Image (tube, helix red, strand yellow):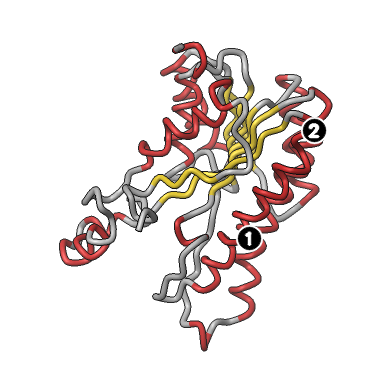
């Protein structure tokens, strides 16, 4: 049974793979035996250092590559480089995302376009280019990053972010149907608020932390490691008949 969740010999491309969420997923995939490609808009030196850390910890092969998810040319160059190194891409994890909070009645369209370019256009570009490679091999697993805010409205300046994650929800479902004949599974992870470097201020503010905890039946805030098991499952043979779905990793927040 344990072998169902192993990823030995697989090639996992994690875009946003050195970020707050992505770094945990990159390490988790490597711990299950996958060779890991860490891609991000971050500088190649920082990416390379993180990739080397994963290799030292797990013994798998790693690679680092800078990418702009809003550019098809940049994405095509990334995919070409991965194929040149490993010969295949078996797993794609789109672990990147952007939120720009602005009051809805004052939302600058430049900011609106920027967040949609990254979260929606970027997701589609990555799926398009990697799925074309997976199609040739007749199989693969794509994991997008959704959110509880993709199915529930939230205030606090989140109109654009909610819109992008709602779009990711339906892109995931549509691609799952279209790519199923090629044995390419497309799913998503839908976390609640996750404590990363960018949201650490919430955990450090007891009043604010308690406000968010009150929305979660399990009574605690999420950390990136909460997503590792679900991501490994979606990438593995254990999820061989699982496609077009979002796993909400939210401590029960969407249950009511």
Q: Residue at x 45, y 20 (%)?
A: 31
Q: CA distance from mark 2 to mark 1?
A: 23 Å
Q: Name the mark on residue 181.
A: 2
Q: Residue at x 51, y 74 (%)?
A: 159
**Relative horizontal placement of residue 53, taking residue 137 as reference (left or right):** left
CA neighbours of label 2 inside 10 A, class few (<14), some (14 to 19), many (20+): few
Q: Residue at x 23, y 65 (%)?
A: 211
Q: Position of residue 128 (x, y in %)?
A: 77, 44
Q: Residue at x 76, y 38 (%)?
A: 179
Q: Position of residue 95 (x, y in %)?
A: 54, 44
Find numbered disc 2 in the image and state the secondary structure of the residue it sits on.
Answer: helix
Image quadrant assignment for residue 198: bottom left
Q: Position of residue 45 (x, y in %)?
A: 54, 37
Q: If you read the primary sequence from the N terminus, does the residue marked by circle 2 or circle 1 appear first?
A: 1
**Relative horizontal placement of residue 49, taking residue 67 as reference (left or right):** left
What residue would you read off at disc 1?
Answer: 167
**Relative horizontal placement of residue 17, taking residue 170 as reference (left or right):** left
Against 251, residue 206 (above or below) is below
Find numbered disc 1 in the image and state the secondary structure of the residue it sits on.
Answer: helix
**Relative horizontal placement of residue 114, taking residue 97 as reference (left or right):** right
Q: Name the mark on residue 234.
A: none
User: Which residue extends farthest left?
Assistant: 206
Against 249, residue 193 (above or below) is below
User: Which residue extends farthest right?
Assistant: 136
Against 57, residue 47 (above or below) is below
Camera sees residue 196: no
Q: Position of residue 75 (x, y in %)?
A: 74, 44
**Foreground pick, 54 / 224:** 224
Camera sees residue 167: yes
- Marks 1 and 2: in contact by CB < 8 Å? no
């Amino acid at each position: 049974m344990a072998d169902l969740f192993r990823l030995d010999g697989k090639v996992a491309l994690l875009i946003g793979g050195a970020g707050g969420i992505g770094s945990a997923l990159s390490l988790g995939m490597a711990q299950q035996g996958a060779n890991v490609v860490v891609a991000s808009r971050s500088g190649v030196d920082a990416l390379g250092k993180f990739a080397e850390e994963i290799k030292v910890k797990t013994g798998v092969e790693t690679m680092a590559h800078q990418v702009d998810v809003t550019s098809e040319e940049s994405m095509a160059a990334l995919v070409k480089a991965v194929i040149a190194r490993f010969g295949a891409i078996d797993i794609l994890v789109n672990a990147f995302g952007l939120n720009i909070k602005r009051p809805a009645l004052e939302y600058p369209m430049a900011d609106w376009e920027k967040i949609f370019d990254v979260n929606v256009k970027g997701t589609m570009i990555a799926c398009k280019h990697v799925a074309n490679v997976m199609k040739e091999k007749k199989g693969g697993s794509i994991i997008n990053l959704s959110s509880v805010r993709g199915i529930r409205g939230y205030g606090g300046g989140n109109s654009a972010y909610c819109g992008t994650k709602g779009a990711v929800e339906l892109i995931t479902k549509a691609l799952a149907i279209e790519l199923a004949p090629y044995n390419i599974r497309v799913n998503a992870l839908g976390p609640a608020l996750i404590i990363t470097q960018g949201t650490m201020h919430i955990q450090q503010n007891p009043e604010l932390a308690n406000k968010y905890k009150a929305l979660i039946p399990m009574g605690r805030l999420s950390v990136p490691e909460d997503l590792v098991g679900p991501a490994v499952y979606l990438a593995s043979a254990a999820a061989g008949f699982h496609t077009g779905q979002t796993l909400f990793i939210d401590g029960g927040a969407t249950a009511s």
